[in-house]
Image: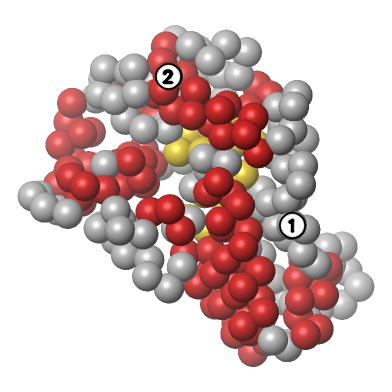
Amino acid sequence: MKYPGLCLISPKRLATCSWLCLFSTFAQAGPTTDQRVELLLSQMSLDEKIGQMVQVDMDALKDNSDIQKYCLGSMLSGGNSDPADNRPGTWLNAVNEYQAWALKTRLKIPLIYGIDAVHGHNNIDGAVIFPHNIGLGATHNPGLVEQAERITAMEVAGTGIRWAFAPLHRRGAGRALGRTYESFGDSPELVSELGQRQCEGFRGRNYRIPALSLHVRNTMWETAAH
């Protein structure tokens, strides 16, 4: 069987994230998360495990039914992967439709969707765009940095997406680094302090695992890069 995907991620990690995302009520009682994941994996065929490891870009998906056909576990939108009508409501409808196809699979494992939201929900028409990290670093204001990511998290969640490929925790040192603008500066202490506050902004102060149900509307997964 051929799989239309761009990258592979761990099936155990992906199953864990997906399970917690949409089945938070179940997560409050019963077996531990690891036990639930092991139970899920024990029921999967090889094709289902392969599908769960595949992450497909929106533009690479030619037929939404392929999500069900290949048991796809994850999707993403890169810098140029947008619906034709690039408005928040259109994004929400698209992501919800992808999710509906995922829930038609035999094991009904939810899809996890990720997007670049490095300085605001910058793919989306009408979103708040914040300065790159080099500008935020110049403020030396941890509270402001956290607030920016909190707003970003709310806007990303408003389009049905729970995973941001952000923030970027890179120490900008020297001209050889071509993406210095992605760094808060060349001070490790500043990068550490502001980076932590970025993560707290994405997650929300009440972020909890595994019982997400009380705060799921205000919660994002962030992927800190360097």
Residue 217: x, y in percent? Answer: 43, 53
Q: In the rendered image, which quarter is residue 140 located in?
A: bottom right
* Left or right: 185 as drawn, with respect to 226: right
Q: Is residue 222 above or below residue 77?
A: below
The residue wearing badge 1 is 128
Q: Position of residue 55 (x, y in %)?
A: 53, 32
173 left or right, relative to 198: right
Q: Nearer the viewer, mark 2 or mark 1?
A: 1
The residue pinned by badge 2 equals: 101
Q: Looking at the rendering, which quadrant does residue 169 occupy?
A: bottom right
Establish if 28 lies above or below 71.
Answer: below
| Left or right, residue 202 beside residue 136 | left
Q: Are marks 2 and 1 in contact (CB under 8 Å)?
A: no
Does label 2 or label 1 sit earlier along the sequence? 2
Q: Residue at x 76, y 47 (%)?
A: 126
Residue neighbourhood size for the residue with mark 1, other residues' Cα within 10 Å, grouped as few (<14), some (14–19), many (≥20): some
Q: CA distance from mark 2 to mark 1?
A: 30 Å
Q: Tell me what residue is drawn at x 77 percent, y 58 percent.
A: 129
Category of crowding for the residue at label 2, using alpha-carbon neighbours closer than 10 angstroms: few (below 14), some (14–19), many (at least 20): many
Q: Position of residue 49 (x, y in %)?
A: 34, 27
In this image, 208 relative to 175: left or right? left
- When the figure is inspected, residue 199 is found, relative to residue 108, above or below; the finding is below
Q: Secondary structure at mark 1?
A: loop
Q: Amino acid at mark 1?
A: Val
Q: Residue at x 76, y 80 (%)?
A: 137
